[in-house]
Image: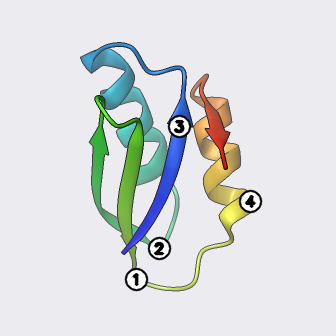
Amino acid sequence: MRSVKIKGMSCQHCVMAVSRALSAVEGIKDINVDLKSGVATYEEEKKVDPMVVEAAIKMAGYEVVE
């Protein structure tokens, strides 16, 4: 299980946007985005470059924080 901290989510629409963005990344499954903690977790079916995950989240309009 991988996780990424996301900045900028404020509502359920944001959660859905991040979920859609991550589901479009090949090799990612079982996505769970928690609005309260600002963390998205997911499983990798195959190795996924973290920069690809970050780019997908940025394209959805949100920021990955360390």
Query: What amino acid does circle 4 point to?
Result: Met
Query: What amino acid does circle 1 point to?
Result: Glu
Residue occupying the point 52% across, 45% down: 5
Q: Which residue is mark 2?
A: 27
Q: Which of the two discs, 3 and 4, labels the residue nearer the N terminus?
A: 3
- In terms of secondary structure, where does tag 2 sit? loop
- In terms of secondary structure, where does tag 4 sit? helix
Q: Which of the two discs, 4 and 2, labels the residue nearer the N terminus?
A: 2
Q: Which residue is mark 3?
A: 6
Q: Which of the two discs, 1 and 4, labels the residue nearer the N terminus?
A: 1
Q: Which residue is mark 1?
A: 45
Q: Residues within 10 Å of mark 4 (few under 14, many from 20)?
A: few
The residues bearing labels 3 and 4 have C-alpha atoms spaced at a distance of: 14 Å
Residue 9 percent coordinates (x, y): 44, 21
The residues bearing labels 3 and 2 have C-alpha atoms spaced at a distance of: 20 Å
Say if mark 3 contacts mark 1, CB within 8 Å: no
- In terms of secondary structure, where does tag 1 sit? loop
- In terms of secondary structure, where does tag 3 sit? strand
Query: What amino acid does circle 2 point to?
Result: Gly
Q: Nearer the viewer, mark 4 or mark 2?
A: 4
Q: Which residue is mark 4?
A: 51
Residue 28 percent coordinates (x, y): 42, 67
The residues bearing labels 1 and 4 have C-alpha atoms spaced at a distance of: 17 Å
Residue 64 percent coordinates (x, y): 64, 41
Say if mark 2 contacts mark 1, CB within 8 Å: yes
